[in-house]
Image (cartoon, rainbow, N blue to C red):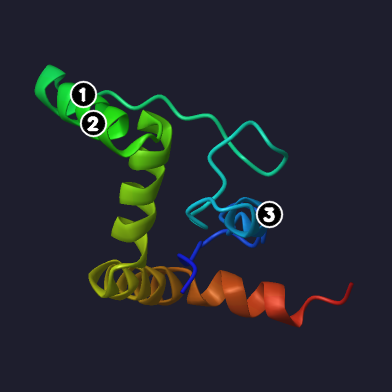
């Protein structure tokens, strides 16, 4: 299951199939490859040390650990319900504008 994105851009979140086929985790692309985005993540020193230790013990990178954790968080069913609720509220709030946009001719 790929995380839902409320933006209409397919390449915002994608599975790195090339990485998966080469023995990688198959989680969203975490390298500087096209289709990836750099993000600054601030964590406590304790969380950083735990990630660093885990990365060393599993022969992976802190970036891969953070990416995998975020990916798993985003595909959790609870997140799906939160996004659906957000979209329902937005549809109600902007119903008139959306109806007008839907009736526009290209």
User: Who comes first in sequence, dot 2 or dot 3?
Assistant: 3
Q: Which of marks 3 and 1 is in front?
A: 3
In the rendered structure, are the residues bearing label 2 and label 3 in contact, judged by CB atoms less than 8 Å apart? no
Lateral position of residue 21 relative to residue 87, left or right: right
Label 1 Cα crowd, 10 Å radius (few <14 / some 14-19 / many 20+): few
Measuring 21% from the left and 27% from the top, which residue is drawn there? Answer: 53
In 3D space, how far apart are the residues under numbered discs 3 and 1 (Cα atoms)? 28 Å
> From the image, which quarter does the C terminus lie in?
bottom right
Measuring 54% from the left and 75% from the top, which residue is drawn there? Answer: 96
Label 3 Cα crowd, 10 Å radius (few <14 / some 14-19 / many 20+): few
Residue 60, image x, y percentages: 40, 35
Residue 51 — which label?
2
83 versus 47 height, above or below: below
Picture quadrant of residue 97: bottom right
36 versus 83 height, above or below: above
Judged from the image, the secondary structure of the residue bearing numbered disc 1 is helix
Judged from the image, the secondary structure of the residue bearing numbered disc 3 is helix
33 versus 106 height, above or below: above
What residue sits right under mark 1 in the picture? 48
Lateral position of residue 103 relative to residue 32, left or right: right
What residue sits right under mark 3 in the picture? 18
Residue 32, image x, y percentages: 64, 31
């Amino acid at each position: 299951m790929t995380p839902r994105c409320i933006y209409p851009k397919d390449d915002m979140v994608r599975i790195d199939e090339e990485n998966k086929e080469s023995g990688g985790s198959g989680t969203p692309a975490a390298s500087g490859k096209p289709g990836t985005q750099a993000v600054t993540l601030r964590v406590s020193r304790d969380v950083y040390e735990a990630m660093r230790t885990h990365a060393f013990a599993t022969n992976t990178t802190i970036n891969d650990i953070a990416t995998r954790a975020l990916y798993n968080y985003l595909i959790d069913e609870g997140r799906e319900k939160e996004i659906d609720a957000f979209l329902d509220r937005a549809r109600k709030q902007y119903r008139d504008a959306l109806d007008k946009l839907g009736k526009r001719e290209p």
